[in-house]
Structure formats: structure tokens, C-alpha cells
Amino acid sequence: MIRKRKVVPKICEDCELHEGKKTRTEQLILCEDCAKKDEHTFITKTKILSKYYLNETDIEDVENIEVNNPHARSQSMYLYKLSDIKSIFMEKYKQDDKDTSTTYYTS
Ligand SMILES: [Zn+2]
């Protein structure tokens, strides 16, 4: 007789309130709401470069997760946390605004 494994409800590791399931990227238990947060959302490098106008240098120090590319098995994909990318984006473009306004007058 095969004994059934007891199913323990998995509680979200973020809010610790709701039941969740393990995410593929972070391997964390997250509920639906927390999984939607920026800090648990991952985007690919390609998207970062096109959507957030960042370049490779901007994100070279950012922590990323290497995953198998579902479209090409031999290649890996690099995923970045949306919250990290957004803060770099904000920093870069806030800074750039000031820089360009001063360079307009000095050059
Ligand atoms: Zn949660």
C-alpha cells in the first residue's frame, strides 16, 4: 500500500498570509498577489534594453538569474528583477535630466 504524502499548505514567504506556490525563477513560495510585485517579477535582458532604455553597462552589476531558454535549449536566458531595473531606470533618467539641462547652457 502506498501511503499518500501529506499535503502541507504552502504559505507565501512574502506576506505570510496566503497560500502560494513555488515560483520557477526564485524558488520561493508566493501567493498570487505577491507574485505580481515588482520585486518578484523578472524580465529578460532584451526587454530591459528596449523598454527601459538601459544598456549592458547599466545592468552589469545587477543580480540576475540564469534560466534555460524555453525557445532555445542550448542558450541561457538572464532574468532581472523588475524592482532593480526600475530603480536603475529612475536613477539614470533623473540624473540625465539634470545633466542635460546644465550641458545645454555650458556647451
Ligand atoms: Zn503573499
Image (tube, rainbow, N blue to C red):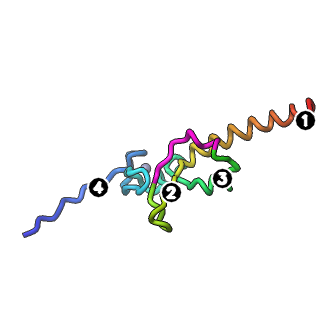
Q: Residue at x 67, y 47 (%)?
A: 55
User: Which residue is label 2 attached to?
Assistant: 77
User: Which residue is label 4 attached to?
Assistant: 9
User: Which mark sits nearer the N-terminus, 2 or 3?
Assistant: 3
**Side of 107 relative to 88 (left or right):** right
Spatial distance from mark 2 to mark 4, Cα to Cα? 31 Å
Spatial distance from mark 1 to mark 2, Cα to Cα? 40 Å
User: Which mark sits nearer the N-terminus, 4 or 1?
Assistant: 4
Labels 3 & 4 near each other (Cβ < 8 A): no
**Amino acid of disc 1:** Tyr
Spatial distance from mark 1 to mark 3, Cα to Cα? 26 Å
Which residues are the magenta region? Answer: 57-66
**Side of 98 relative to 105 (left or right):** left
User: Which mark sits nearer the N-terminus, 1 or 3?
Assistant: 3
Residue 97 placement: quadrant: top right
Front residue of 79 and 21:
79
Residue 51 placement: quadrant: bottom right
The crowd level at tag 4 (other Cα within 10 Å; few <14, some 14-19, many 20+) is: few
Count of picture labels: 4
User: Which residue is label 3 attached to?
Assistant: 49
Spatial distance from mark 3 to mark 4, Cα to Cα? 39 Å
Picture quarter with the N terminus = bottom left
The crowd level at tag 2 (other Cα within 10 Å; few <14, some 14-19, many 20+) is: some
**Amino acid of disc 3:** Leu
**Amino acid of disc 4:** Pro
The main secondary structure of the magenta stretch is: loop
User: Which residue is label 1 attached to?
Assistant: 104
65 is higher (above) or lower (below) than 103: below
Ligand 1 within 8 Å of disc 2? The answer is no
Labels 1 & 2 near each other (Cβ < 8 A): no
Where's residue 76, x and y in %?
Answer: 48, 57
